[in-house]
Image: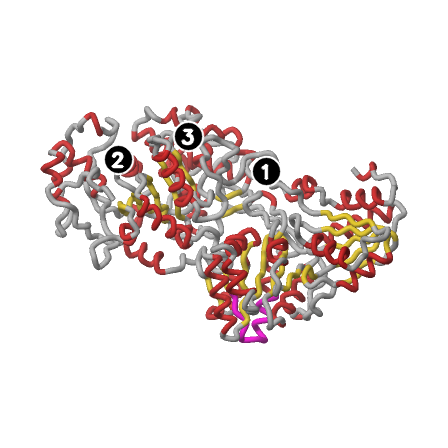
């Protein structure tokens, strides 16, 4: 990897520390000059971040004001696109950062969303758009949680009140939303891979634009980031990786007992690196080559050329082939601009990693003090930080799952739990608090979580692997389906997969939609596939999974709250007979066979049909695999119409039902069968009700389908 383009003066290579001799002002050569507004780049210990007390930005803290209406932002009001920032002074960039932070707080207080991460990258975002020129230059924001300042600066400020709402802005970067969003995000640890692809594509096409991949907020705990860096070091294409190190995971790891630190050896190494005062041994004689006028320029970069030193004197990242600079104070505009400008001006360097230290929730004391609770927020009062959470009488399915698992573990010491940096999101922080030695956070590494669980199962334990349905895809497709298929299903290891956020998920949109889990899990020969229709059923299904000890099993449950049914005594579920469903309502002519949460919609449709004189049967399948063949055969033989309903994709529960119907000859007569599934496309973010309506899975849609099949009027249902 070529490193000669970087200039490092010899006087900062000594182990004795920094000198003040570099603080003399001098002009810089025109070929690599900074803005005239840059201060003299003195070398100084970077202690401002670690010693800084929590406070908000000047436009809020010094005035002591939090605005119910939009705060005054006179400078930000003049910035519609990054081009409008190019002539600002450093002082004005600092003012812009203050106003941008105020605007983020105000907007998110009205819409909800990912607050903490976005507040932490305000200065970094301003510096990036000041130095680089999007959309020609490519800036990729890993996960997308921290992209709100980027959206405001790239022509979308007036649309921020629509964020995460139907027909509004996405909560993540999205290629179809803006030309400044060069890559869509929502899942973690992808931007180095995508950025490397863009860099290589640029080189093959003879272009010379810059590619910057911003990764962090926990995303460096995932293996894909290291696979990408390893490949980047080999290919040696010019690209910049910015490690946004805010010492947090990508989603809150705790909501009961406060935040948990990121896991893994890397997190410990980065923490040590942040406090390492030693400078790296840099090449000697460089100052003779670059001359005195370049001392201050090079010093601004070399101030941060400290090392996470290995035995050979190189950093972990340099061992992978990336040139390392850092750590850099991510809230110091002067330093960020200087470093980014120097790195941008250097060509043929290969991949460079800039390690930036930021504070999650920066500038809003409530978010600084409780970054787990302000990672993702609902609407809130900016003045008090109070979030306007729902007042439902029932708890979330996530909480019910955790309570059910705790109840199982109370009576069975072999029950253990695994999550992928999602203790709060999966509810397993509740399990962790009760059984700290039996709960494992493996970081953002779903594929590792699955095979780790397989190893636990080999030792006779009963692992429950709790992963969002949408994130389960990451474990399923890793190494050509090698994890779930080869490591679990092929070996018939009794790993239990708890798939949260199944079906449509509302404001988080298609990146987090759990549409495909039934399709890809139910095709596996040894997998038992289940879904509860309400919270009481969830307790029983957790008990069922715990009792299945000869093969793998999985169950899905939705985002949102329970329907309000009575829970089992002591939260202890009763195992079901595997492969047996139930009849909830006896009727004639039309049978509605629901799977999972769709059963509630079937019950609602039955009420509508009853009002129109049609008494429909409603059944709860409980199992997609194995199917309750006796139940389905009975429904098919005793009804004119059979409608299967599920909040999942094509190829799921309904496909398994029709496969059985066809093989059993039940489609050879007069039976009319219709599947109702999610449409074969991605449904955009919006309210849950709007998404269900767009999918055509409301009770009125089910009732209308039934009436249409028996030749009855249905118009009044719409």
- Secondary structure under the numbered disc 2 in the rendered image: loop
Q: Looking at the image, tell me whether mark 1 or mark 3 is earlier in sequence order.
A: 3
Q: Which residues are magenta?
A: 404-417
Q: How many marks?
A: 3
Front disc: 3 or 2 = 2
**Label 2, label 1: how far apart the Cα atoms are:** 42 Å
Label 3 crowd bin: few (<14), some (14–19), many (20+), radius 10 Å = some
The N terminus: image quadrant: top left
> Which percent across, then down, holds residue 534?
69, 58
Q: Looking at the image, tell me whether mark 2 or mark 1 is earlier in sequence order.
A: 1
Q: Residue at x 21, y 59 (%)?
A: 311
Left or right of residue 455, residue 281 in this image? left
Query: Which residue is at the front of the view, 382 or 593?
Result: 593
Q: Which residue carries the number 3 mark?
A: 135
- The question of residue 406 being in magenta is answered with yes
- Secondary structure under the numbered disc 3 in the rendered image: loop
Q: Which residue carries the number 2 mark?
A: 347
> Which percent across, then down, holds residue 458?
50, 73
> Which percent across, then down, holds residue 367?
45, 47
Query: Which residue is at the front of the view, 13 or 255?
Result: 13
- The question of residue 240 being in magenta is answered with no
The colour scheme used here is: secondary structure
């Amino acid at each position: 990897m070529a490193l000669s383009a970087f200039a490092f003066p010899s006087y900062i290579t000594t182990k004795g520390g920094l000198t003040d001799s570099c603080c003399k002002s001098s002009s810089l050569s025109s070929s690599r000059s900074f803005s005239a507004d840059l201060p003299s780049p003195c070398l100084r210990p970077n202690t401002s971040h670690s010693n800084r007390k929590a406070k908000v930005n000047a436009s809020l803290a010094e005035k002591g004001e939090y605005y119910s209406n939009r705060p005054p932002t006179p400078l930000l009001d003049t910035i519609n696109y990054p081009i409008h920032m190019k002539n600002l002074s450093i002082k004005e960039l600092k003012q812009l950062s203050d106003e941008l932070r105020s605007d983020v707080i105000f907007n998110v207080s009205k819409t909800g969303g990912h607050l903490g991460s976005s507040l932490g990258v305000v200065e970094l975002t301003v510096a990036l758009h000041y130095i680089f020129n999007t959309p020609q230059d490519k800036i990729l924001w890993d996960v997308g949680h921290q992209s709100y300042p980027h959206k405001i600066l790239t022509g979308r400020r007036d649309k921020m009140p629509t964020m995460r709402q139907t027909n509004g802005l996405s909560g993540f970067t999205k290629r179809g939303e803006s030309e400044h969003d060069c890559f869509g995000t929502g899942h973690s640890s992808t931007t180095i891979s995508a950025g490397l692809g863009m860099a290589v594509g640029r080189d093959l096409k003879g272009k010379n634009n810059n590619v910057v991949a911003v990764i962090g907020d926990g995303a460096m705990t995932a293996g894909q980031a290291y696979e990408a860096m390893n490949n980047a070091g080999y290919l040696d294409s010019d690209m910049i990786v910015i490690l946004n190190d805010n010492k947090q995971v990508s989603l809150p790891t705790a909501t009961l007992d406060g935040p948990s630190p990121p896991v893994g050896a890397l997190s410990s190494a980065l923490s040590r690196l942040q406090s390492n005062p030693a400078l790296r041994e840099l090449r000697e004689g460089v100052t003779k080559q670059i001359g005195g006028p370049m001392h201050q320029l090079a010093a601004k970069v070399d101030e941060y050329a400290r090392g996470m030193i290995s035995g050979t004197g190189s950093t972990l990242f340099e061992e992978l082939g990336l040139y390392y600079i850092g750590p850099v104070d991510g809230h110091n505009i002067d330093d960020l601009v200087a470093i980014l400008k120097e790195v941008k001006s250097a060509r043929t360097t290969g991949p460079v990693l800039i390690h930036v230290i930021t504070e999650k929730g920066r500038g809003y004391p409530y978010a600084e003090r409780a970054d787990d609770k302000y990672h993702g927020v609902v609407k809130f009062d900016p003045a008090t930080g109070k979030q306007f959470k729902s007042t439902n009488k029932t708890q979330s399915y996530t909480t019910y799952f955790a309570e059910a698992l705790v109840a199982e573990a109370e009576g069975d010491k072999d029950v253990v739990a695994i999550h992928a940096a999602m203790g709060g999101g999966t509810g397993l922080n509740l399990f962790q608090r009760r059984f700290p030695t039996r709960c494992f956070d493996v970081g953002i590494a779903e594929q590792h979580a699955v095979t780790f669980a397989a190893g636990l199962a080999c030792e006779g334990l009963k692992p429950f692997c709790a992963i969002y349905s949408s994130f389960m895809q990451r474990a399923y497709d890793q190494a050509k389906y090698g994890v779930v298929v080869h490591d679990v299903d092929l070996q018939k290891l009794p790993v239990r997969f708890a798939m949260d956020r199944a079906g449509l998920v509302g404001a988080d949109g298609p990146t987090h939609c759990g549409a495909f889990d039934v399709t890809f899990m139910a095709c596996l020969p040894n997998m038992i596939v289940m879904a509860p229709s309400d919270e009481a059923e969830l307790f029983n299904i957790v008990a069922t999974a715990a009792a299945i000890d000869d093969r793998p099993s999985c169950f899905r449950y939705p985002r949102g709250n329970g329907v309000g049914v009575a829970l089992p005594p002591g939260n202890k579920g009763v195992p079901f007979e595997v492969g047996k469903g139930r009849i909830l309502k006896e009727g004639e002519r039309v049978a509605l066979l629901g799977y999972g949460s769709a059963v509630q919609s079937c019950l609602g449709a039955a009420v509508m049909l009853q009002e129109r004189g049609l008494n429909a049967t409603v059944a709860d399948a409980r199992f997609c695999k194995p199917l309750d063949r006796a139940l389905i055969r009975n429904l098919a033989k005793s009804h004119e119409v059979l409608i299967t309903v599920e909040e999942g994709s094509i190829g799921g529960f309904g496909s398994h039902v029709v496969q059985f119907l066809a093989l059993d000859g039940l489609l050879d007569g007069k039976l009319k069968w219709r599947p109702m599934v999610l449409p074969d496309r991605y449904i955009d973010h919006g309210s849950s009700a709007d998404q269900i309506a767009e999918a055509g899975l409301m009770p009125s849609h089910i009732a209308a389908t039934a009436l249409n099949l028996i030749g009855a009027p249905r118009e009044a249902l719409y």
